[in-house]
Amino acid sequence: MVSVRLMDISKNFAEIEILKRINWEIQEGELMILVGPSGCGKTTLLKIILGSLKPNSGKIYFNEELINDISISKRNIGFVPQNFGLFPHLNVHENIGFGMKMRKASQDKVNFQVSKIIKMLKLEDLELRMPNQLSWGQQQRVALARALAIEPRLLLLDEPLSSVDWVARKEITMEISRLQKTLEITTIYVTHDITEAFDIGDRITVMSASKIEQSASPEDLIKNPKNEFVSSYIGHNRNVQRLGSLM
Ligand SMILES: Nc1ncnc2c1ncn2[C@@H]1O[C@H](COP(=O)(O)OP(=O)(O)OP(=O)(O)O)[C@@H](O)[C@H]1O
Ligand SMILES: [Mg+2]
């Protein structure tokens, strides 16, 4: 298990400052939810933790280790991107084993681990299918399986459920929550769904354009929103979603 600490992380694209001096801590084994309006920088922040983007300034620590210059594969992070990122030319089994193969695991070990994860995520009937033969929800499960197969020390989920319907989403959300607790993986989970955030988050972080407004437990966020932005973002989105679930 790992804790994550960001110190004064800033990121510019061209002249525009997308992240401004972000300070953020995620504790060992915590399920941290990240919410905020579209374009505020959530994916950018995840990519900086993943290592696919370099910050312009600031430091990233896993436990006490500074990891700014550590490569993506050595960071050992399971990542489910917004579009799932499955390899179209690999079947489900091969997609799930891909990260292990990249890390030079033996074929026996890959097969063993992939079978274990396939059982865990109930993908047995889909093992030999290609991604274009899967529904969105199934692709999402495979992407999650692929992220878990490397036994990551940190799991980053970028809106993994945005394209599946409400019922399937509820089911998968609970599955993720259960897996996260069983496997004890520190997890950062980006979502637009505030109800989902309140259902499963140990803590919730609310971002506005380029900065973090507040990180707190669900109860605290409701009782003590730090400012107008947080209270209206949470209040408005919860009401909209409550209505949505009734329709
Ligand atoms: N490679 C890039 N070059 C230039 N601008 C970028 C790049 N990637 C992202 N941006 C900009 O950075 C801002 C933050 O993008 P980001 O994808 O992090 O937002 P987000 O919070 O994940 O949004 P969403 O909820 O829609 O996924 C946006 O204004 C986006 O247009
Ligand atoms: Mg995003």
Image (spheres, rainbow, N blue to C red):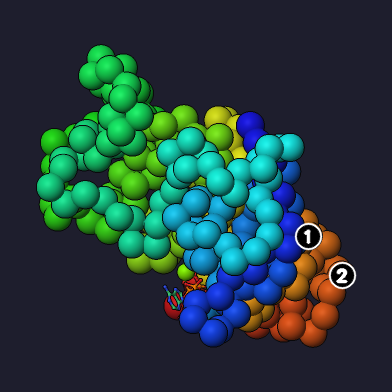
Q: Circles 1 and 2: CB distance less than 8 Å?
A: yes
Where residue 80 appears, as percent x and y from the top left, is: 41, 51
Q: Quadrant of residue 185?
A: top right
Q: Tell me which numbered mark, 1 or 2, is placed earlier along the sequence.
A: 1
Where residue 26 appears, as percent x and y from the top left, is: 70, 49
Which residue does the numbered mark 1 point to in the structure image?
216
Which residue corresponds to the image point at 74% horizontal and 37% vertical from the top-left?
A: 64
**SS under mark 2:** loop
Task: Note whether 102 is above or below 41 in the view shown.
Answer: above
Which residue corresponds to the image point at 40% horizontal and 57% vertical from the top-left?
A: 81
**Amino acid marked by disc 2:** Asn
The residue lying toward the viewer, choosing from 55 and 141, is 55
Which residue corresponds to the image point at 49% horizontal and 51% vertical from the top-left?
A: 51
Quadrant location, the N terminus? top right
The residue lying toward the viewer, choosing from 91 and 12, is 12
Res. 106 visible in picture? yes
In screen coordinates, is 56 left or right of 53? right
Label placed on residue 224? 2
Foreground label between 1 and 2: 1
